[in-house]
Image: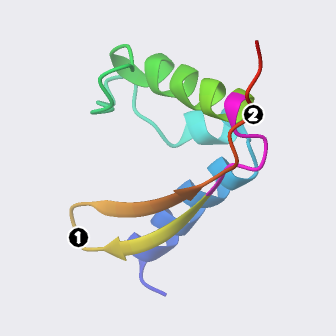
Amino acid sequence: MNSHRALAERFAQTLTDHDLDAFGELLDEQYVNHNRFAAPGKDGSVAVFADFFAAFEDFRAEVDDIDALSFQFLRFGRHLHRR
């Protein structure tokens, strides 16, 4: 497994494990999450995934495609409708 693939797999595993501390360790403080609901920086991305985990208790991520510059992930989960 090349180092890019290993990093992508580690990234996906932190999300599948719902381990926000480990996920945050992989992100630079200036990380840009292109999700329009994410606040800028690492903290914004961590907060978005905290919300995902609250809404999708079985949330998991899998690496779908990878090249030297980007990762593409598949995300799965069952939404918990709470009022």
Residue at the spot of label 2: 80
Q: Position of residue 46 (x, y in %)?
A: 55, 26
Q: Position of residue 51 (x, y in %)?
A: 62, 24
Residue furthest to the bottom = 1
The residue at the point 38 percent across, 13 percent down is 39
Placement of the C terminus among the 4 image quadrants: top right
Q: Residues within 10 Å of mark 1 (few under 14, many from 20)?
A: few
In the figure, residue 3 lies in which quadrant?
bottom left
Q: Position of residue 62 (x, y in %)?
A: 55, 67
N-terminal label among 1 and 2: 1
The residues bearing labels 1 and 2 have C-alpha atoms spaced at a distance of: 36 Å
Q: Amino acid at mark 1?
A: Ala
Q: Nearer the viewer, residue 19 or 3?
A: 19
In the image, which residues are magenta?
A: 55-60
Q: Residues within 10 Å of mark 2 (few under 14, many from 20)?
A: few
Give the dominant element type of the magenta stretch: helix, strand or loop. Answer: loop
The residue at the point 69 percent across, 30 percent down is 55
Residue at the spot of label 1: 68
Mark 1 or 2, which is nearer the eye? 2
Tag of residue 41: none
In the figure, residue 76 lies in which quadrant?
bottom right
Q: Nearer the viewer, residue 62 or 26?
A: 62
Residue furthest to the left = 69
The answer to if 54 sits in the magenta stretch is: no
Residue 40 in the figure: left or right of residue 43: left
29, above or below 49, in the image: above
77, above or below 80, in the image: below
Residue 76 in the figure: left or right of residue 33: right
The residue at the point 60 percent across, 41 percent down is 23
Q: Secondary structure at mark 1?
A: loop
